[in-house]
Image (cartoon, helix red, strand yellow):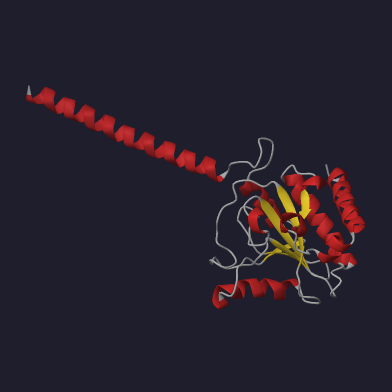
């Protein structure tokens, strides 16, 4: 009787232990799947896209510190568009504006940031990963990627270098997330803000920009 009871206890203990192992395995698998959910059934995962960005020799990562004012660390669940902005501080560099965003963690004066900043010379800095929210586009922060572009004067017109780099970056992101030029919008289209100024005041220039983006998408597919 005693031996039979011991056998039963051993069997039950083994079953419980196996159940715990299976439960842990299922939870780990679920977590891994959630971290790799594609933005669309046919799109790359967030992790894969960011890994590809690391390998681009024309994009430099200078991430903002995690903080409530410019990089909350909140994950994007989907990407439905790319928002184009002008930086608003004429004749400043991408790094200067990146550092301004970073310093908001200290000054706490407002909420502002961007996923990418394109410099006057066409250099591109990534401030926030593509799977995280940036504070750039108000109610569209949670489903878009933002690109801020530096400009030399108050007209907001981009330099040739910054224009070409913005077309290249926008088209690359669209291709990775299965978007088209129709999914590229201005900050103006979100809330009526005069941003990017030149593209708001010159509708033909905006139409041309989107056409250049679509052409770049098509050429690289």
Horizontally, residue 26 falls left or right of residue 160, namely left
- Camera-side residue: 71 or 109? 109
Q: Quadrant of the N terminus?
A: top left
Is residue 55 among the parts visible in the rendering? no
Q: Nearer the viewer, residue 9 or 64?
A: 64
Viewport quadrant of the C terminus: top right
180 or 110, nearer to the observer: 110
| Residue in the picture at 38% in, 34% down | 22
**Could you say where residue 76 lies in the image, as x and y percent from the top left?**
60, 50
Task: Name above or below for residue 6 compared with residue 61.
Answer: above
Task: Give the residue at x 57% y 68%.
Answer: 69
> Looking at the rendering, which quadrant does residue 101 occupy?
bottom right
Can you say whether 211 is above or below 105 in the image? above
Q: Quadrant of residue 178?
A: top right
Where residue 157 sits, quadrant-wise, is bottom right
Residue 214 coordinates in the image, percent (x, y): 86, 47
What is the residue that sits farthest to the front in this orientation? 192
The outermost residue toward the left is 1
Using the image, determine if residue 213 lies above or below residue 162. above
30 lies left or right of 110? left
Q: Is residue 66 left or right of residue 48?
A: left
Image label count = 0
How far from the left and from the top, in percent, is residue 39?
A: 65, 42
Q: Is residue 100 above or below residue 8?
A: below
Residue 210 screen position, x and y as percent: 86, 51
Residue 99 visible, this angle: yes
């Amino acid at each position: 009787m005693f031996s039979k009871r011991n056998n039963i206890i051993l069997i039950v203990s083994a079953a419980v232990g196996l159940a715990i192992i299976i439960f842990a395995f299922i939870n780990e698998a679920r977590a891994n799947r959630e971290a790799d959910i594609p933005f669309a059934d046919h799109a790359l995962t967030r992790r894969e896209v960011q890994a590809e960005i690391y390998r681009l020799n024309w994009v430099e990562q200078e991430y903002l510190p995690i903080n409530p004012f410019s990089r909350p660390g909140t994950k994007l669940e989907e990407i439905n568009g790319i928002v184009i902005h002008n930086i608003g501080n004429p004749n400043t560099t991408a790094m200067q504006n990146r550092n301004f965003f970073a310093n908001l963690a200290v000054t706490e004066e407002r909420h502002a940031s961007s996923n990418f900043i394109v410099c006057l010379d066409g250099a591109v800095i990534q401030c926030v990963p593509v799977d995280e929210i940036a504070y750039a586009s108000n109610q569209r922060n949670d489903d878009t990627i933002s690109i801020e572009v530096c400009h030399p004067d108050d007209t907001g017109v981009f330099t040739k270098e910054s224009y070409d780099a913005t077309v290249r970056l926008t088209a690359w992101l669209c291709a990775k997330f299965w978007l088209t030029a129709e999914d590229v919008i201005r900050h103006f289209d979100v809330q009526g803000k005069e941003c990017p100024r030149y593209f708001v005041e010159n509708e033909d220039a905006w139409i041309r920009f989107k056409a250049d983006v679509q052409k770049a998408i098509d050429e690289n597919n």
